[in-house]
Each structure stands twice: as C-alpha cells, then as structure tokens.
Amino acid sequence: MESTARASGGAERGTLEIAFRTGDLDYVDPALAYTTASWALLHAACARLMNYPDQPPPAGLRVVPEVAAGPPRISSDGKTFTFKIRGGFRFSDGTPVRASAFERAIVRTLSPGIRSPGAQYTQEIVGAQALQSGQSTTLAGVVARGSQLVIKLRRPIPDFAARTTMPFFCAVPPNLPVDPEGVGAFPSAGPYFVSEYVRGERAVLSRNPFYRGARPHRVERFLVDLRGGGDDEVIARVESGQADWGLAAAPFYLDPEKKLVAKYGVNRGRLFVKPGLSLRAYVLNTSRPLFRDNLALRQAVNFAVDRTALVRAGGGGSLLSGRPTDQYLPPSMPGFRDARIYPLAAPDLPRARALARGHLRSAKAVLWTFAFPPAIAQAQIVKRNLRKIGVDVEVKGLPPPALFSRVAQPNAAFDIAFFNFSADYVDPFSFTNLFFDSRFLGANNWAHFNSPKYDRLLRRAAGLQGDARYRAYGALDVQLARDAAPMVAVAYTNTVTLVSKRVGCVVLNFTDLNLAAACLK
C-alpha cells in the first residue's frame, strides 16, 4: 500500500518511512516493550536519567547523564542512588519533567498484573515485592521530591546507573495508567513522541515541540508500517525506496544471492556493517575434572579453536556476520584494549599442543549446544579442532530452554557449552561480573568460575565510576582472558542494516539504527 507521503509526491520530505516485519513491534509502552523494533522507536522518544550519546562507538556506548544533572550520588554501602533532575525537559504536552516521572516509570514495571520484563531490573528496589504482590500500593524504595529522586536497593547493584538507560526507565507522565495490554500513544519527553499507534498496522513518531535537550532530532516524523511481512520483503522495500529503513536478520542482508555487498559496498551510504554487542563463545566448566584447576588446558583450547571458521559457519559463510574476538568485552566498549592473546585468523596448533601436553587428564569432553543445524555445525568445528590436541569431544544438542535451565546448575554434566549473550544495556559489568563473579553461580556464571582473586578484582572495578571504571575493566578483561581463560570468546556479531538512498547521518547502536541521529538528504 502506498503511504500518504509517497502518494503526495514526496512533498513531506521530513517523513522517514520504516517497514517492520509482522510481529516485530510488541508494544510502544515503555514498561512492556522488549524487542529491537520497539526499543528503536522508544530510544528516539524516551528521556532517561542516564543515556548513551547519539554517536558511533566507543563514544556512543559511554553512559552519560541525560535528564539527570550528573552521575548519581551513591551511598557508601552502594545501596542508595540519589539523582538530581535537571530543569528544562518537558513532555510533548508541555508538562515539566520532575522526579515523579521516573518514580512512575519504575512503579509501572512492578505493578501487579502488568508482568513487565523490566521487573528483572527493578525487583531489587526496597519494597518491590510488596508492590508486586499487592500488599502495598506504593514503592517504599523510591522517593521523588521535586527535582530529587532517591532509589534504595536491598543489595548493592554497581551497574544500576547503566540500567536506567533502558526504556523501562523512560520518563512517563505521573498519571500514566497501568494497562496489561500496554498504553498506545502517550506524551514523552525525548526528541519524539508516539503520536499514533494502531496495533499490528502502524505507528507514528512526531517531533516533541517542547524538546530543548541536546539530542539530535533532524527528521520531522517517522511513519512505521507494521505489516512488513518477512525479512526478504522488508529488504526489497528498502532497496526499491518504498521504505527508508526496516529490520531484517543479518544473514538475509548477507545472502550472496541478493548481492547487496556488490551493489552498495559496505559502509558507503546504503549497506552498513558495524560491530555489534552479542557475544558468541564457549564456556569451559571449571567445576568439572577436565578443566578444574587446569589453566594450561583452558588456554590450549583457546589456542586450538578456529574462530574464523566458526564465524563463517554461524553467518551463512560470510565473515561480515561477526568480528572474531579472543576477549570478553565488546571491542567497541570504552576502555577495551586489544591484547591479541589468542589467534583470530587460524588456530595456533603448536602452541595449543604444547600447553595441552601433560594436562589432558581424561581427554574427553561433553559439549552442549543448541539443537539447531548452525549451532551443531559450529560444535563439530570445535570437535575437530580439539581432536588435534588430543581431546575427544562428544556433542549434545539441546533445545534452548533445556540448555538454559541446566547449564548453570551445580554438577551440570557438561565440560564445554555454547554461550550466546546479548546485553539489554551496555556496561562492562554485564560482560564480566555477570559471567565470572562467584555471586552469579547458578545464574549467568555458566563457567562455574569461582576465584576469590577475581571476585576481588571484579568487585573493585564495579565500584568505580567514569573513566576509571572503563580503564579498570579494560585491564581486567585482558587478565581474565589471558590468565584465567574460563571461556573461549569466538566473535561479536555485527549489526547489519540497509537504508534507502534518502537516508543520511547513519549511526548504528545496540538498538540498530539510531533514529534520533538520522537525517534525510
């Protein structure tokens, strides 16, 4: 169907048209939205306490104050965060933004019956359980008075400030109702607001006439078609100019039959490939006899694995699908130091064999992975790689729910497991502490890594702020990968997108295309 802007002969040069696949957009309600599509829209509409600059990484991944006047004041016990709200921010209906806007956002994630995915990030606030269960109608741990917001936690959460960059913490009107089905169009305080929403059909983002913040807002409005069909249809519409941007899975852009790379090149104006934030890796179970207190063999596995072959196998044969890595922090993360610890282009078998010699123990390993053909194919590559250093690998494919529920359990019967992690917010804590701090045994610490030494280092880095925090994590990332090796980092998947010839000012961040930064030529 031809849109209004197209039908009018392109008179509305300020309208950027978006095509989303059917089902891509779950909600536009910040308390419920939890897909890439919905976060791409809300990133342009939301005003948050802390945010990321609308710039390419690494600057674009550095947490900075937005509506907060500065970084939060953190109590000595790490359990109270105090934010001061800066003046000048207004909702799209002209109402000033005060601390109560953020109090309401947090309360909505914990309100009974709403089942917000944001509750996983707010449930450690004092009084959260009482509110969720209906025993209280207020949230004891959040106090909003004018321009001051105080948040009290049941335990220290060092990355709490970074959590407030997520849309769950988007400033909302203090009287915005709680609806399990999600609210539609509503006033927001970012550069744009959702001015129209018809579930399953369309959404419209218009410029906030009262926005005076520093974020760019170069396009007049975004017209979003929610009936885009599948990946191929979305790409075809953007190629032909029927849409200016859409969402499709990376392998579809890189499909050799489409020849998009040959037609447009890479990062030359239409097809963009940038480092992403999803880590593919294999954890080594340090609680099992094969790898327990066996650093030499863990290092040997890291030298033996063919990362380039694994990237090809996981990306339909294209190396553009991911960037091989031997470290745990994303290469685009502020503070990242490229230490070149293990080989990325091809295995170093002489080094791997030398390390493995005398440390093979049973020489048998059980590898758990997803029961999908690409994941099994990658596991077979690991099996062949490790056979060359004397380790016999048995590959077991499991449905994702089964793998997720079993891999972190004590006495889990695996030695190696496929690990695929995508962060909801970008902070070095998410890529190190969650994986390797013993506090997260039974949860994200799939390597069952339990080291008092690294617990101290991880927790000390978590307590820092600003540049000191990024520097500490950059050094710790190298130390963990080189001197502990509880995981085989393989690659960070790339973000791939296509835009029409009208679109300029392309910035890719962890929600794909940054709509606030985009412009029309």
Image (tube, rainbow, N blue to C red):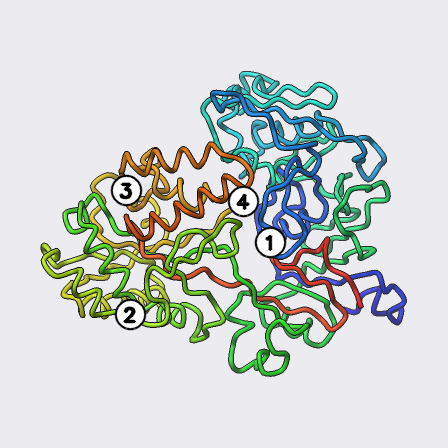
Tell me which label, 1 or 4, sits earlier in the chain: 4
Tell me which label, 3 or 4, sits earlier in the chain: 4
Coordinates of residue 373 in the picture (x, y in percent):
35, 68
| Front-lying residue, 380 or 345 | 345
Coordinates of residue 395 in the picture (x, y in percent):
23, 62
Circle number at residue 511: 1
Circle number at residue 226: none
Tell whether label 4 touches label 2 (CB within 8 Å).
no
Tag 4 residue: 425
Tag 3 residue: 449
Quadrant, the N terminus: bottom right
Quadrant, the C terminus: bottom right
How far, Cα to Cα, is label 1 from label 4?
10 Å
Q: Which residue is drawn at the image coordinates 74% and 47% (left, top)?
A: 215
Q: Is residue 339 left or right of residue 466?
A: left
Tag 2 residue: 347
